C-alpha cells in the first residue's frame, strides 16, 4: 500500500496511506534506536500533553527493555501521574526487576477505578501468583457491580476492565467462573466489550 510521510517526531514517523488512513511507525521498534533518560526527564516538564502522549505511544512499541529504557521507565514511574502509569503498564511485563514491576502494577489497580485493562494484561503476562489476591479483589468488585445493575450503567471502560481482569485470573488461577463471566460479557449490546470478551475466550 502506497503511503507518504506526513509528520516525524524524535521517536516516530506518521504516514498517510492512499486510502487516507494514518499509520504511526515507532522508532523504538529499531533495537539500535536509543533515547537518553536524562533527555526525556529534562524535556518532560515543558512537553505538551500531546507531545508526552506521542512519546509514550512510541515507547510502548519497544520489543525489549534496554538499560536506558529502564531508566526512562524509572523516571515515568516516579511521576505523580496515574495516566502515565496506566499507559506504561504493558512495559512492566518486560521490566528487569520483577518485584518492582509487580509492586508498581498492584499499586495502580489499588489506587485507580477505571482504565486498568493494560495493568491486568501485564499481570497476565507476568503470571505471578502473588498478584491473585489484589486482582481477585477487583474481580469481586466488578462482579458485584455487574450483577446489581445493567451493563449500560457500568460503562464500556469498566466492562472492558472486567473482561481483562477475568483474562488475567484465567491465567493466574484457572477457574470456570471466569469463562462464564466472559461468555456473559460476550452477549452484552456494547460491541467493543463483546468483541474483547470474544477475543479473550477464543484467542
Image (cartoon, rainbow, N blue to C red):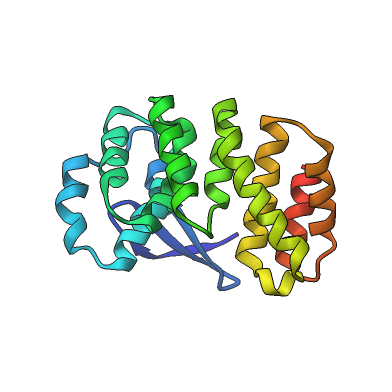
- Give x and y (percent) for residue 82: 38, 56
Q: State the quadrant of the C terminus.
A: top right
Question: Going by the image, does 175 lie left or right of 12?
Answer: right
Question: Going by the image, does 118 lie left or right of 62?
Answer: right
- Determine the residue positioned at 66% across, 48% down: 139
Q: State the quadrant of the N terminus.
A: bottom right
Residue sitting nearer the eye, 136 or 47: 136
Residue 104 quadrant: top left
Question: Going by the image, does 110 lie left or right of 31?
Answer: right
- Give x and y (percent) for residue 43: 17, 55
- Give x and y (percent) for residue 37: 22, 40
- Determine the residue positioned at 65% across, 70% down: 155
Is residue 194 at all visible to an observer of this figure? yes
Residue sitting nearer the eye, 139 or 76: 139
Residue 146 quadrant: bottom right
Residue sitting nearer the eye, 133 or 170: 133
Residue 28 quadrant: top left
Is residue 34 at all visible to an observer of this figure? no
- Determine the residue positioned at 59% across, 26% down: 129
Count of all numbered marks drawn on residues in the image: 0
Residue sitting nearer the eye, 157 or 49: 157
- Give x and y (percent) for residue 120: 58, 44
- Determine the residue positioned at 75% across, 70% down: 149
Amino acid at each position: 500500500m502506497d503511503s507518504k510521510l506526513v509528520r516525524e517526531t524524535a521517536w516516530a514517523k506518521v504516514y498517510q496511506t492512499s486510502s487516507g488512513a494514518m499509520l504511526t511507525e515507532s522508532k523504538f521498534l529499531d533495537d539500535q534506536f536509543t533515547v537518553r533518560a536524562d533527555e526525556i526527564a529534562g524535556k518532560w516538564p515543558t512537553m505538551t500533553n500531546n507531545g508526552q502522549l506521542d512519546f509514550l505511544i512510541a515507547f510502548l512499541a519497544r520489543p525489549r527493555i534496554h538499560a536506558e529504557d529502564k531508566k526512562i521507565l524509572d523516571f515515568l514511574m516516579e511521576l505523580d501521574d496515574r495516566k502515565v502509569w496506566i499507559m506504561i503498564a504493558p512495559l512492566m511485563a518486560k521490566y528487569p526487576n520483577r518485584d518492582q514491576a509487580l509492586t508498581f502494577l498492584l499499586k495502580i489497580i489499588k489506587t485507580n477505578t477505571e482504565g486498568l485493562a493494560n495493568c491486568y494484561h501485564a499481570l497476565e503476562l507476568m503470571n505471578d501468583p502473588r498478584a491473585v489476591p489484589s486482582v481477585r479483589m477487583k474481580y469481586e468488585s466488578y462482579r458485584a457491580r455487574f450483577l446489581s445493575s445493567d451493563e449500560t450503567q457500568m460503562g464500556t471502560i469498566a466492562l472492558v476492565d472486567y473482561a481483562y481482569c477475568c483474562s488475567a485470573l484465567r491465567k493466574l488461577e484457572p477457574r470456570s467462573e471466569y469463562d462464564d463471566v466472559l461468555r456473559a460479557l460476550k452477549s452484552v449490546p456494547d460491541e467493543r466489550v463483546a468483541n474483547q470478551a470474544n477475543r479473550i475466550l477464543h484467542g
